[in-house]
Amino acid sequence: MSIEALRSALAAEHAAIFGYGVVGAYVSGAARDSARQAETAHRDRRDQVALRIEAAGGAIVGAQGSYALPFPVNDASSAVRLAAQLEEGTAGAWREALSGTTGEDRALALDALIACAVQATRWRKAAGISPTTVTFPGGATA
Amino acid sequence: MHSGISRRVLLRGLAAAAGVAGVGLTAGCDLLADPVVNLPEAAPELQALLAQTVALGDTYDATIARVPSLAAVLTAARDAHRAHAQALAQALGITVQVNATNAGGSGPTDPAGARAALIDAEAKAEAAARELCLTASPRLASLLGTIAAARACHQEALR
């Protein structure tokens, strides 16, 4: 169960890294720096969770060649909105992983959920989206 | 692993906490018909988290009363804490009735001080939810994790 939960989260991290490639093409200045830092965080988490899966004897989920974007991205404003959505999406994957993990894997999932949710809040602030927070980060609770 | 806990006893404990926090609690419709129910082992800790969550919502209400200029910033977090309290109560099998409190109470009256006080309260609350999440049952881990994340987000929003 734990490996499957982590594999889903790994797939979400791959998608977020792809998405940040798009975001980075449209933003500049401080937003570009923020995007780079956020992408690095996702790459680090991707590597960390891949190692966990490998150590547990599981098969690594590879990245897809491309991913469908949730809406057209053609300027800085839409790129920042995409960044917020990427973070909320990965937060959702890690939130789902919580119920299928224990111990160190649970801690990894929780830290990732919190980090992604906070980064989503930062992007909403940058985009002037109000409110900047959501009631249940990572999706509606069961 | 479950322990049999009298729902009436549980409700009395919650009602005591709610009295401090300014909320009313009512039992589910089958209280008298089924006075003993099975609750997760972590129920006492969940009760404490529920009381803390209700108190956080009250703290936001009091802050909004003292510093009305922050109302637009604080309302979403206040509402989130109310929703979290409802979700936690549902996990405990009880009903929470939240009565908005408008009393300002004591605390900072300047926006910067009020923000700092709320960030401090949210950080402590995040740590409490995080700790419970790490050892929670699969059924509760998701809820406790998203509550911890929401509290971290509130800190970011207040900065």
Image (cartoon, coloured by chain):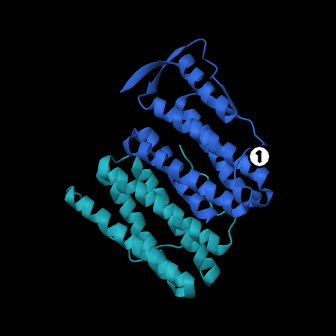
Residue at 57% from the left image edge and 49% from the top image edge: A140
* Residue B2 pos. (x, y %): 39, 25
The residue tagged 1 is B104
- In the displayed structure, B95 sits above or below B57; it is above
Taking the image as drawn, is residue A27 in sight? Answer: no
Indicate the quadrant where residue A130 lies. Answer: bottom right
- The N terminus of chain B sits in image quarter: top left
Residue toward you, B41 or B31: B41
Image-based side of B29 in relation to A24, left or right: right
User: Color of chain A here?
Assistant: cyan
Q: Chain of mark 1?
A: B
* Residue A54 pos. (x, y %): 22, 61
Q: Secondary structure at mark 1?
A: loop
Give me the chain that's blue: B
Indicate the quadrant where residue B89 lies. Answer: top right
Instruction: Residue at the far top: name it.
Output: B33
* Residue A121 pos. (x, y %): 58, 65
Residue toward you, B130 or A36: B130
Q: Amino acid at mark 1?
A: Gly
Residue at 64% from the left image edge and 79% from the top image edge: A77
- In the displayed structure, A14 sits above or below B6; it is below
Image-based side of B71 in relation to B146, left or right: right
Residue at 56% from the left image edge and 59% from the top image edge: B153
Residue at 58% from the left image edge and 63% from the top image edge: B156
